[in-house]
Image (cartoon, helix red, strand yellow):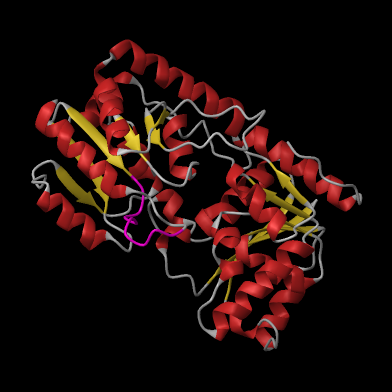
Amino acid sequence: MKIHLYGNVLNWAYQFGTYLRTLGHDVRVFVDARETSPLYQPAWEHGESRELPDWIETVDVRFNRLLWPGAREREFLKKLGECDLIQTFGEYAVWAWRSGAPYVVLSYGGDLEILPFAKGNLKERVLGGLVTHALRRAQAFVYAIPSHHGLVRQLKIKQATFNPHAVPIDTSRWMPAPEEDRCRLRARYSQHRVFFHGARQEWTFKDANDKGNDRLFRAFARFVRNDCPDSLLIAVERGRDLAHSKALVAELKLSQNVVWSKALTKPDLLKMLNSVDGFFDQFIHGYFGVASLEALSCGVPTFLKLRRDGTDGVVLPPVLNVSTEDEIHRAMCEVDQAERMRSLRGASRKWAVTYHDWRVVMDWYVGVYRDVLAGRGVAEC
C-alpha cells in the first residue's frame, strides 16, 4: 500500500511510518516546518539532529489557510492525497479530509476532549468545528481511551472503532536494561529510593489536562518525612503549573528531595526509566499515555489513576492504581516489598510486549487499512 502520514503528534507519524516501511509499505511522512516543540520532531527519538531520510518531507502550510488555501496549501493537499490512504492524528484530520483521499484517524485525546468544544476566539471555534467535521468524515476513527465512549457518541462519529491497544511501541528498544547497565545507571544517584515523575505540571486549572501533580508532591513529602528520608523525586520541568509546583515543593520543605529535569529525549528517557524505582504519570484522567507504555515495557513499577468503567473485555495494565494522596503514599511504601515489585516488573513487561509491541499493533492497523480500501466496516479490537 502507498500510505501517507501527517500530523506528527507525539512523533506518531514518524513512528508509524518507520514501522510500516519495515512491513514493506510505500510510505511518505510529512512534518511541519512550523512545529516549535522539539518533542514533536523526529530528532527527539534519537536525541540528536539528523538529516531526514528521503521518505520524510517538511511542509510549510497554515491551518488558517485551510478553507481558502494558498499556492503552498494547494500543492500540499494535492501531494498528500496522492496515495492509497492517509493515516493522520487528531486535528490534522482536517488536511486529510480536504485532500479527498480516504483516511484513518488516531485520536490522542485533546481532539475529542478540547477542540470540538472550543469557546475562545473565532479562529478557535472555527478550527473546532472543522476538526469535528473531519473526524466524522474519516473512513475509520480509532480511539484508545475508554472514557471517550461518550464523547464519540456525543460528537456523532459513527465510523469509530475502540482499540485500547492502538498505540504501538518498539518493545525491543523499551526493555529492561541488563543488571550491570542498570547498576551503572543507578549509580548516578546516591539516594536509597529514586522516582521519576514524567507528566506535565497541570493541576490548578481543573480541566481535561489536570494531572493531579500536587497529590504526588504531598504524598512524597509524607514518604520522606515518615518512611524514607533518603529519597529523590525527579520531575519534568514543563507545564502551565510549573511555578505552582515549585512553590509547593518549597512549602513542603522538599527542596533537597526534588530535582527538576528538562524534558528528556527518548534515549535519555530510556536511561532514566532503567535507573529508577518507579514512574509516576497522572492521578486524575484515568488512563495512560505513551510514557507509561514505555515505562511498563521497561518493567518499571508505574503509578497512575486507572479507571475501570468502560473497560469490559479490556486487559488492563498491571499498574499501581492510585489517585488520592493517601493511595499514592501507601503505594510508595510498597516499593520496599521486593518480591511484589519483582512480580510487578515481570507482569508489566509481559503486558506491554503482548498488547503494544509495534508488530502486533501495526498488523491490526494494516487490517483496518485493507477494510477501508475494500469498503468494509472496521470492527472493534
* Quadrant the C terminus occupies: top right
Q: Nearer the viewer, residue 149 or 68?
A: 149
Q: How many marks?
A: 0
Q: Find residue 244 and report its horizontal and vertical position in percent.
A: 22, 60
> Which of the 4 quarters of the picture holds residue 56?
bottom right
Q: Find residue 284 and report its horizontal and vertical position in percent.
A: 42, 46
**Residue 61 visible here:** no
Q: Residue at x 8, y 46 (%)?
A: 253
Q: Find residue 133 and report its horizontal and vertical position in percent.
A: 73, 69
Q: Nearer the viewer, residue 15 or 299?
A: 299
* Majority secondary structure of magenta residues: loop
Q: Find residue 144 and report its horizontal and vertical position in percent.
A: 62, 44
Position of residue 67 relative to residue 305, above or below, is: below
Residue 205 colored magenta? Answer: yes
In this view, the residue farthest toward the top is 339
Q: Nearer the viewer, residue 237 or 309?
A: 309
Q: Residue at x 45, y 31 (%)?
A: 296
Q: Residue at x 23, y 27 (%)?
A: 184
**Residue 340 visible here:** yes
Residue 46 colored magenta? Answer: no
Give left or right: position of 254 versus 260: left
> Which of the 4 quarters of the picture holds residue 322?
top left
Position of residue 236 relative to residue 31, above or below, is: above
> Which of the 4 quarters of the picture holds residue 341?
top left
Q: Which residues are magenta?
A: 198-207
